[in-house]
Amino acid sequence: MSGYEINFDGLVGPTHHYAGLSFGNEASTKNKKNMSNPKLAALQGLEKMKILADLGMKQAVFAPHERPHVATLRQLGFYGKDEDVIAQAMKASPDLLSSLSSASSMWTANSCTVTPSADSADGKVHFTPANLNNKFHRAIEHPTTARILKAMFHDEQYFSHHNALPSVALFGDEGAANHNRLGGAYDQPSLNVFVYGQQFIGQPLGPKKYPARQSLEASQAIARLHGLNDLNTVFIQQNPDVIDQGVFHNDVIAVSNQQVLFCHEQAFVQAAHAFAEIEAKMAVLGAGFHPIIVPKSRVSVHDAVSTYMFNSQILTRADGKMTLVVPEESRQHTGVWNYLNEIIDSVQIIDQIQVFDLKESMQNGGGPACLRLRVAVNEDELEAINQHVFMNEAVFEILTDWVETHYRDRLSPLDLADPQLLQANRTALDELTQILKLGSVYDFQRI
């Protein structure tokens, strides 16, 4: 069998707006209350998916969530017709309505953690939705995420789905944004590297300014649920000092693909010890380890965060070489761009850079890596996935028309109380579930 890595990119939802909801994510807070363009954001994301699919990558679409989330507003004491609920929430707490209108599910790197069948004890692909308990606007996502995942990976012969971990800080889980898989072919046993921000039992070392969103205890629980063992797991602590500089997830300071780990030298606590463990365990698996470590003398943590050079994708092409996918912001920074091109010249396995304009997502704090969930599968598992979610020319045209029809090109926080927005969004999402053959995954479809 041949192995494949599929990138499931989040389709930006129609309530994409700049609310500054994510404390610790400096791009998010810096652009608070700016006017957003949901239509442009969605089209930028679709263009990225289409180009990567055209390059021969396995590319699929991850549906957005229903927003505003009226069910949660009702849970918080607002009542009446749906339109009345939203109007009451805007009057009582505009910030609360903004939180429950967030389009943050677009960043599917946080949707769940995935373990391929080659690594799990039972030979199935495992999914655990992230509880995202550190941020209220994201903590409500996992029930819908679970339904969407099951609609895409529905065959119980190949796929196993778990409930989210308990929604407390001890088991704070932010999904694949803090998980790396290192190895050879995608359908062969590989090493699962879990990166955590803080250990809550027995070791208080953590950041001082911003929260550590991923706990060691959560990463260990995921490993147990997914049937991993000591031979194919490594747990590394993220450097608390870089968390306090805006590195809220590991994927803001490191990215991996097969045998390559591209990271900043200040990314981890006791990095040398961790790298030695990775190299030793990968050798047992029959794979080499090739870290590309960027020195702080060349790129500061501040510049890495502002350009999202590590919030990138490393994709293996059909010829075996790799392409580095970065946002336009990385090209606009002379020092970062020069260094990336030096990598292309010196590291033979990565020989191409692909740049995307993702400004709408970037201004809300998410780059290329935030927008995608990686799922490694074999040939049989690939065929068992809902085929309607895969990107191709026809799907691109249909979804482009769908966005052009249903999305606004300007959205402010005040617009979230517009009752026409709620109905328009539901009409759009109902149509989307028919396009992608997802069934009734949204609350309004299940009443």
Image (tube, rainbow, N blue to C red):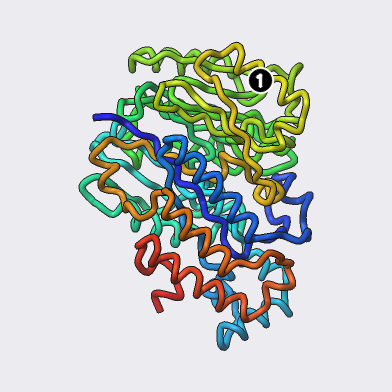
| Residue nearest the viewer, comparing 145 with 306 | 306
Q: Residue furthest bottom?
A: 80
276 or 312, nearer to the observer: 312
Residue found 28% across the figure and 35% down from its top? 378
Number of residues whose C-alpha sits closer than 10 Å to that of mark 1, classed few (under 14), some (14–19) or many (20 or more) = some
| Residue 361: percent from left, percent from top | 65, 49
- x, y percent for residue 44: 61, 50
Q: Identify the residue shown where x is 70% and y is 45%.
A: 25
Relative to 5, is 168 above or below? Answer: below
Taking 351 as reference, is 131 above or below it?
below
Depth check: give the residue in front, 248 or 389. 389
Residue at horizontal 59%, vertical 54%?
A: 43
Query: Could you tell me residue 292's position as x and y percent?
Result: 58, 17
The C terminus is located in which quarter? bottom left
Decide if residue 164 is in sight here.
yes
Q: Can residue 244 be seen?
A: no
Q: Is 236 left, or right, of 436 in this rendering? A: right
Is residue 395 positioned above or below 258 on the image? Answer: below
Q: Quadrant of residue 26?
A: top right
In the image, what residue occupies the spot 76% across and 16% down? 297
Q: Which residue is mark 1?
A: 341
Q: Is residue 280 left or right of residue 382?
A: right
Give the number of callouts.
1
Q: Quadrant of residue 87?
A: bottom right
Report x, y in % for residue 302. 76, 31
Secondary element under disc 1, as helix, strand or loop, is helix
Amino acid at circle 1? Asn
